[in-house]
Image (tube, rainbow, N blue to C red):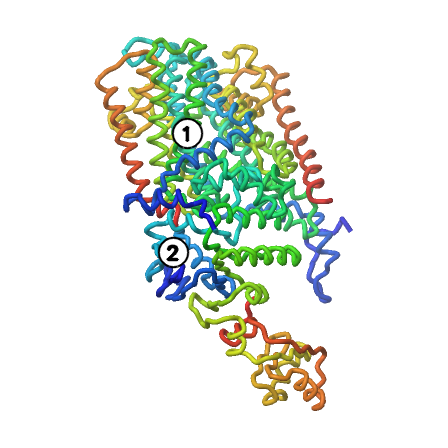
Amino acid sequence: MPVIQAQNLTKKFGDFTAVDGISFEVAPGESFGLLGPNGAGKSTTMRMIGGTSLRTSGSLTVLGLDPEERGPEVRASLGVVPQQDSLDEELRARDNLIVYGRYFGLPRAYLETKADELLEFAQLTEKAKAKVNALSGGMKRRLTIARGLVNEPRILLLDEPTTGLDPQARHILWDRLFRLKEQGVTLVITTHFMDEAEQLCDRLVVIDHGKIVAEGSPQALIREYSTREVVEVRFGSARNAAMEAELRGMAERIEVLPDRILLYARDGEGLLEQISRRGLNPLTSLVRRSSLEDVFLRLTGRSLID
Amino acid sequence: MSDVMAPVKERLANRPSWLAPLYAGNASAVIERGFRVIRNANWGVIATGFFEPVLYLLAMGVGMGALVGGVPGPDGREISYAMFIAPALLATSAMNGAIYDSVNNVFFKLRYSKVYEGMLQTSLGPMDVALGEIFMALFRGLLYAVGFLGVLGVMGLVTSWWALAMIPVALLIALGFASLGMAVTSFMKSFQQLDLVPMVLLPMFLFSSTLFPISVYPGWVQGVIQALPLWHGVELMRQLSIGFFSPMTLVHLSYFAGMTVLGITLVTFRLRKLFLR
Amino acid sequence: MTDVRHEQPVVTFTGLDHAALAARTRRWGWLHYARYRQASEGPFLVTALMLAIGNPILYLAAMGLGLGSIVQADVSGVSYLHFVAPGLLVATVATTGAQFGTWPIFGGFKWIRNYLAAQATPLEPGQMAQGETLAIGVRLFVQAAIFWVIGLAFGAWPGGWSLLAIPIATVAALAMFTPLMAYSATLEEEGLHFNFVQRLIIMPMFLFAGTFFPLESMPIYLQWVGWVSPMWHGTQLARMASFGLAVPPWLVGVHVVFLLACIVGGQVWAHRTFTRRLVR
């Protein structure tokens, strides 16, 4: 039985439709991703799952319960890591964990040990008594994530978990998330980073303008909507558009972006050779494997990060 | 994996269905947070918080008292000007504190510091948050009321043991304003709207027989003032300070009882609008 | 280059003359900044106007008429309304001035960051502080004038010389504003500082400034609060202008010098704190 089930989920703010009739299911222990640009409706969907945003129409169950009808009960099994840290700035780091645990109705004795364990997990043991405002951005993020684990949630909702983290901190976090997944925790992750989605998600939906435009595993999506490899060439911003005509027909598909041209092909190196044989000498060129970025470009005609 | 939340979940599963979306029966966790914040807070701020009514009392009671002389008290007998304004200042300070906590503080925590967002990511419901915050507002009100009454006692400005009842009455006044204030906050959208609050409180403070009796006004103005809550609070406090009661005492008390019931009902209906989007 | 006149064209045939632009900013920056400051107040204009009109009506009605009706004798030789009106004018405008010196200045550094934005231009920190004072001064003057006009309707002014209360109130308000502005520019963290400023400085200065009663009716050990309050010095001058309060000439000198010293001292201090904050 799926742990989350959404049917035609819709959320309107006045005239603006943030989430436009999306349907999806998340299986227990699965790592499920919502991929899309900023403003696509991912965060709103997350908030509806936690019952802190009221849907306009459609149905939604989390662990068999409607979060709108039984919000506190649903959230007892959820860990929430919001996009913007909502740490309590009037409390110190360790007190943030303890007080947050008390909100769940957990006993103080349990929380005393759990807080130390979580500080360890977040590598913040030395910062236990620090004021929240004295922590760096990355530390605040780790504390927020640790806080989301205080009730040992069955489902962890992570909204843009690594935005603002440096590469090293991201990898540490990814490692922690893998371990949670191994313990059977269901992960629901929104991200606009392709590499993150590819690293973490078993399955994902691509969301644009509040609608699901594709669904599948990262590999399946790439297979379905892109080619195996991509050649990126630059001729300088003045010439890129003019070169399109010359290149047409050489690749399965061409995307002309303001700063570069993307050529989709099974064999990238071969295509690049072919291009230089024709005497078209790009200023720079690069052959790479297709990514979810290409899937998104194909599906929406836009890049994920503007 | 053993579930640490099992007892909590069991309790939550057995709530009556009308409470299920709103209340987890855990307002005490919000109160616990409040006390932790107070413990970490700067005690100077808490101490100076009660300077305001005391300074008003010193300045107006002493300075203005020299110009005014005696004023008719609740029982018609003349009392000193300081005795006249002291209970009014206590009522006003209960109002100001409650409104500040339920409007400015709540709005700030909703829109800016995201404290409530954090709370509502847990198994707390909006009603836990509202109850906890109103309790904390009352606790602060209690501190200030006790402190101010102590000052009045030392200065000899209360003449009856009934004055001790000014403390629970200050809490009743605070509860009335806090619940109504929180309901009003649920309609607020921008920081600019917060500027409207003093525009309501200041005239109420200036005209509700705080600094001079309302008998100086024509009848219809008196009627308007008597419809407003602060006047009832001021009159009630004044009666308690000398231990004089009349049928109006009941009217004042019922006014605040009604205001509290109205406020809490409104807040309950507006809870989702206030905390959920 | 500092003698470049304001009129000199900045946009020349060779394009934007950056040297001239910079020189002009150096000379006139405080004025540009003041204009910018006024423009940025736009959204709050309605609220500000409501307060500027509402406060005089409320205070004059409550204190002048209501409280006045239970004051038994003339105060300083005039009716209570005539006595209290100049005090209320100075006190309300000066309180506004003090408030402008706290959160808005701090917020400018911390949240809105308009000083940081302005700093990316050739504007110098000291000029921002000057522009700030000018812009606020204009607003306070307008607020004082509105108060005076409303006072007319209440019959609060016995004579035409009371018009002088408008500039006097503006000066007293700036005497509150510039030192607080300088102080606010030193604050890095939003904390409880302004709570203390409000409760331990602004409020006592307001209550013990002889606004509602002559300062002499206070015990001597409380009178000093009035002596260090720009509001009291301003109120005394405004009362002289309005109904001819008798003040010995040496004391008039003290009032004037005290207010000007606060403004200039505050401005010099602000020059320093703005520079220290923005140039590091």
When the figure is inspected, residue B164 is found, relative to residue A293, above or below; the finding is above
Which residue is pictured at 36% across the width and 39% down the height?
B25
The CA distance from mark 1 to mark 2 is 45 Å
Q: B28 or A241, which is in the foreground?
A: B28
Residues C94 and B196: in front is B196
Secondary element at image label 1: helix
Residue found at the far left of this picture:
B247
Q: Amino acid at mark 1?
A: Asn
Of residues A93 and A286, the one drawn nearer to the viewer in this rendering: A93
Q: Residue at x 53, y 51 (%)?
A: A84
Q: Tell us which disc is closer to us: 1 or 2.
A: 2
Mark 2 — residue? A63
Residue identified by numbered label 1: B96
Q: Identify the element where label 2 is drawn.
A: loop
Viewer-proximal residue among C77 and A20: A20
Residue at 55% in and 23% down: C237
Residue C129, relative to residue A61: is it above or below?
above
Q: Are marks 1 and 2 on the same chain?
A: no
x then y, percent, for residue B141: 42, 26
The answer to which image quadrant residue A126 occupies is: top right
The answer to whether any part of residue C49 appears in the image is no
* Residue at horizontal 51 percent and vertical 22 percent from the top: C239
Label 1: chain letter:
B
Measured as percent of width and height from the top left, residue A204 is found at 48, 67
Task: State the residue lying farthest toward the front.
Answer: B1
Res. C217 in view: yes
Amino acid type, callout 2? Leu
Q: Is residue B24 placed above or below A293 in the rendered structure?
A: above
